[in-house]
Image: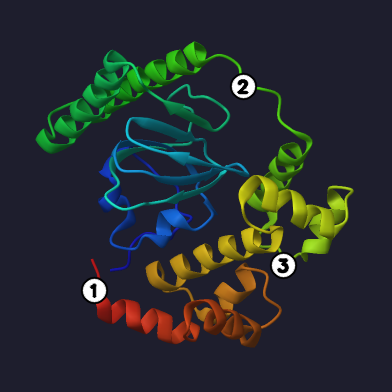
Amino acid sequence: MRHPAPDAPLSQIKVLTLAQLTKGEPWLLEQLHVRNHHILLWTTRGQGRVLLHGLRRGFGAHNAVFIPAGKLLAFELGLQVQGQAILIPDDGRVTLPDRTQHLRLTDGLAQAELTGIFDAMRRELHEDRPFLAEAMNAQAHLMSISLRRQVQTAGPLPPAKAAERIVRRLCDLLARDFRSGQSMAAYAEQLDITPTHLTRVCRQSAGLTAADMLSQMIQHEAHSMLIHTDKPINEIATDLGFGSAAYFTRFSQQHFGHAPSQVRKRAQGARPLT
């Protein structure tokens, strides 16, 4: 049996270590992508970089990174990074912030509070006692309260620069339309700027060109669909906006080093299917 399709809605709250979340495949977090569920990442050791809604910044120990469903994320795992993640379905069961948040918790009590919530949720899952779903929802509500309190304590963010506003608008367009096959010129036109200017502001804010951002999202989705689903390759090509299966094959060879069928075959041989 295959893993669920990458776009299958999450049905229950999950708590995973970062190692469990990536399943030995760092690209699952490190490449720019969009999720259909909310995710809170809590790092307890190490440092790296995170790209949130078009803005790249560093993170370290005791950082909480929240990404609502539908917002772009790339979480680059540096050496020795350890942490956990809470995944919450996008069904309104928990009140959560409506924008990405990156909080550096320096207060020991705040760190202990969030760590305690993670521990309680993992204990619930491990013991699998009656009313598990209700208990997990209750803990997720406590997590949300703790997160929103920290957001309030941190105070309002400084006004976004013009370049950041453009890149955020691009991120919203990419989250919605990256499977459409649109050219980067078409995205620039929707933003009322030239492709050259779009490339420049993306480099300033995200550390990537606009074309690289789009390419990473397509790579992530293509890789996920090839590895985690049985969908025919020509259908994957169509779903991702490629004009033909041959064009998709060239894209796969360029970015993965193999044709789509070989990517799928190598993944099947690398680990047992569950």
Q: Eyeballing the image, is 116 above or below 33?
A: above
Image quarter of the N terminus = bottom left
Residue at 36% in and 43% down: 47
Q: Position of residue 119 (x, y in %)?
A: 19, 29
Q: How many residues crowd around disc 1 within 10 Å: few (fewer than 14), some, or many (20 or more)?
A: few
Decide if residue 185 is on the left or right side of residue 160.
right
Residue ID for mark 2: 157
Q: Earlier in the sequence, mark 3 or mark 1?
A: 3
From the viewer's perspective, is 147 left or right of 193?
left
Q: Name the residue at 26% across, 50% down.
A: 80
Q: In x, y percent, where is residue 207?
A: 61, 52
Amino acid type at circle 3 is: Gly
Image quarter of residue 105: top left
Mark 3 or 2: the one toward you: 2
Mark 2 → mark 1, Cα distance in angstroms: 44 Å
Q: Residue at x 68, y 44 (%)?
A: 172
The local secondary structure at tag 1 comes to loop
Q: Is residue 151 above or below residue 262?
A: above
At horizontal 36% and vertical 84% (from top left) the residue drawn is 265
Which residue has dot 1 on it? 271
Q: Which mark is residue 181?
A: 3
The image quarter containing residue 63 is top left
Q: Please identify the quadrant where the C terminus is shown.
A: bottom left
> Left or right of 259: which side holds 121?
left
Cα–Cα span, label 3 and label 1: 32 Å
